[in-house]
Image (spheres, coloured by chain):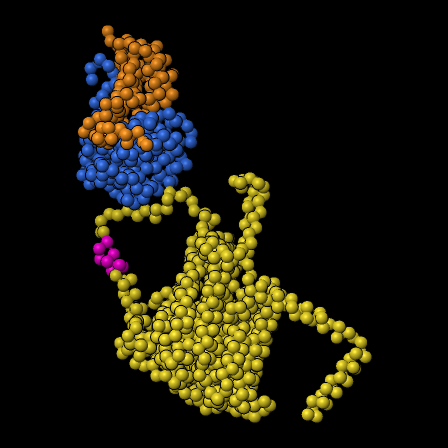
Chain colours: A orange, B blue, C yellow
Amino acid sequence: MALWFLRGLRRGVVTTRYPAVVDPWAAKLPSPPVFVPGHLTAALADQLVALCPSNALAREGTHLVLDVGACSGCGRCLEAAGQAARPSGVFELAATSREHLVKRVPLKGDLL
Amino acid sequence: MTPASPLGDVGATGEEAAAARLKEAGAMFGRSLHIRTVDTGSCAVCESEIRLLLAPHYDLHRLGFFFTPAPRHADLLLVTGPAARAMDIALQKTYDAMPEPKVVVAVGACPLGGVYAQDALVHGRLDRVLPVDVWVPGCPPSPLALLQGLLVAVGRLSAKVGGLSFCEGAPL
Amino acid sequence: MIAGWLWSAATCWAAAALVALGASKRLNATLAGWVSAAGGLAALVGGVLLALGGRATGALATSSGPVGGLVLRAAPLASAFIVLLGLVALATGMFSPRYHRPGNGTAIYLSAYNAALLAALAVLVAGNVTTFLVAWESMTLASALLVLRHRSQQGAARGCFLFLALGEVGFALVVVAFVLMATQCHSLDLATIAARAGAVPLAWRSAAFVLALAGFGFKAGLVPFHIWLPVAHPVAPADGSAFLSGLVVKLGVYGVALFGFQLLGRQAPWWGLLTMSVGALSALVGILYAMMERDLKRFLAYSTVENVGVIVAALGAGMTFASYGQGPLGAFLLLVALYHVVNHGAYKTLLFLETGALEHGAGTRDLDQLGGLVRTMPATTVISLVGVLGIAALPPLNGFVSEWLVFQGLFQGFRIPAHVPGVLIVLAAAVLGLTAGLAVMAFARAFGVAFLGMPRTRQAAHASEKGQPLLGPGLLAAACAALAVGAPAVLVALDRVARSVTGVELRPDLLAPDLTVLPAHTDFSAFSPTYLAAFMVGVSAVPLLIYLAARPRGASRSVPVWDGGIVEFKPRMQYTATTFANPVRVIFERFYSPTVHIDRASEDPAGLSGPVHYRMQVLPLFEKYLYAPVVWFFRRLARLLQPLQSGDINWYLLYILVAVVVAYFIAAQ
């Protein structure tokens, strides 16, 4: 018997109420990283750019460019960055323009 | 390469024009949408997530959205895969067969230029082949993300990611 | 009047036969063709007048001679067949000269063809037994020459042999039947036999009928006597096959009708039931074999078997109704059978002529090598479409009208009080219904695979219809439409024929004043072919008018038809004739019992190392289980009797002595 059926019998309703109510476990899904500029050195940024298997990270002078669209949620940059990155927990990532998905994160050297 | 987009001029008001267009499309089929999926060479995990939309937990039909195999009946083209060149003709034929107004949604990291964009056998970004209205990132995007993408495509939700910075502690 | 037309037809054909002997020159062939066509026109008019006249003419010619001499008399029963003969001669006369290359072979062929036309006319106006038999045999021999036109072709000898052999067996049975009746009625004259038949005991009449049914069945192509049809038709040239299918088999039907309705007086019920059963079975077997054929001419030959089955089933049902006292229904079914004779002659001739044009234009008759001819041979396609719609019995054409009327007659089997005939008639109607459905599928297959889609071979892609004669087939297509729309007029003429044969007056139970056809009873059904045709044309115009009035005027976008996104269509992706008919093969697997050979280059199931060849052979049921044992038996018998032909002259002298002594004793009695 399908688990969702038993869950439904227990709770009364099986179907999600999205978009009215977001499911509580949605934040735990794989998601693009949020960078902490305070810990993000240039050397670390270059390391992360080399690591990313799907061309989502690039270095543009004093900024790290994160292409949220290209990010595959593999988590290698999260593992390597330590304190400099954490999962964003955002799943509502749809965009009407491709440029909205390209984010520029300032590197540590800029914050004085 | 910036191909012609059905959104009209992409300029300062490009975003508003896009939103207006999606709202217009949404007014026509916001409550009753027929979706045609095309796989241009994906690994089929996005297809699994799309298939899950019909399952009882996400239940796409409660939103009035349906899948249809016939592009003649379709309002929205849902494209997965990195736009492999071998699928050019089929994709173009499917797009041409859809009557106006139509919306194109690119799903997953592949048509957005991730993962396989360097490969010689694919275009990489879907907007090199078709004009794209909504981009849904994720690898694969969870069914919740897909739901949000579809609702954005018909104007029932507004896109939020433009306002996010993915940058902790710094001003927006 | 009628005599004048018929004599001019005969003269034209005799003249054409002589002119054609010089047909090594194009001019002679053309002249012979036009004269032959003129003869056909004369025969057509004569036949129509004979039908409308409603009674037999006086003797057209008499001469005394051995065994009764020559007597020619035109009777109404033959009128439909004379009309058909005229129509076929007219169409083929316009077709043949441009179809055949001038040469010696053509000369003999055209000459033999006109001789066959003349002999067929003689059969139809034969007034006594001798004339009938002599004319019949002449027609058979002349037709055999037609089959032999391309004698170096593979299968030509076998085709001619089977045609003659089965023709002779049938002829022998027919001779016995005629002689039986002639000796019982003490006369060789057909009219006298008909008048005196009532006095002959039923046993003799029944024997004569069964012999006639079998004997004429050989010529008509009734199962199991049909095996010459699919063998002789492919080797004969197109107009020869048209003549064989369009006319020669109809003469077999004429013989059955002659014996069933005219010569034998009051029918016994079981004659009609036997005929009807044989006809229905024949129809089903014919169409089942037709469905599996790849060669267009073999396909059309089996379709002829099917249609002759329908005609003979209608005749049999008519005989049954007549024998149970249902005179109007008996006359109605006879009328409908004659109508179907003319209809089938029209569209079958058309289809065979167009198959000839197709063979010349595309180079092959094999369905699996054709395709896409609608683009390269449009006129042939349109004309063939008319023929196909007719033979598949689709409204509003003539095939539909006559099949519909056959069914309307059969459905009234409840009017017979006895149970067994009622059940048999219902079964026959069911079998004919199945046959009609299969016929639609078979002809959809033949037309679709040959003309529609993409060309399957380079030959088909480069087909051309330049130089193909269109006048003859076009005339037949127009005749098909005219026979449908003008059905009320045709039925009026045939009603007079039926009345003179059966003595039953059908109108006004046949035709209401508003062009509605009634099946011999006013309370059963009604149907108007004319209004149906007008209605169908009108209704098809409505969507067109709506589109023209309401089409969107603004900007619109034209894109190709949605095809699933296929990059390129290849001809190999299409249905072949074999695969289209596959469902029928699977359903009737027991009947077909096909032997299947599959050759692979290797055991690789994906077929990557080379092509896989699939060959399927349908079981030739009658050849294997009926003819082969019979032939084996006679061979054994001949081998047993062989010692008599020892070659020793002393034994032969002994035989002569014994024969003389026996003759002396017989003569001395």
Place residue C399 in its image quadrant. Answer: bottom left
The answer to whether one can see residue C473 in this image is no
Residue placed most toward the observer, A25 or C3: A25
* Residue at x-position 56% and y-position 72%: C146
Query: Where are the magenta residues, as a range?
Result: C543-551
Which residue appears farthest toward the top when viewing the image?
A112
Q: Quarter-wise, where is residue C58 in the image?
A: bottom left
- Residue B100 among magenta residues: no
Residue C527 shows in this picture: yes
In this rendering, position of residue C341 left or right of residue A91 = right
Q: Residue at x 59, y 75 (%)?
A: C168
Number of numbered discs overlaid on the protein picture = 0
Instruction: Please give left or right for residue B38 compared with residue C353 in the image.
Output: left
Q: Quadrant of the N terminus of chain C?
A: bottom left
Q: Position of residue C505 (x, y in %)?
A: 34, 83
The answer to whether residue B82 is left or right of residue C133 is left
x, y percent for residue A52: 36, 19
Q: Residue C449 at x, y = what percent? A: 45, 56
Q: Reply above or below: C659 against C441.
A: below
Asked whether, in this view, residue B58 is left or right of residue C572, the answer is: left
Task: Name the one closer to the observer, C429 or A96.
Answer: C429
Query: Magenta-highlighted stretch: main secondary structure?
Result: helix
Tell me the quadrant of the picture where the C terminus of chain C can be found.
bottom right
Residue B41's spot in the image, x, y percent? 39, 33
**Magenta stretch: includes residue C546:** yes
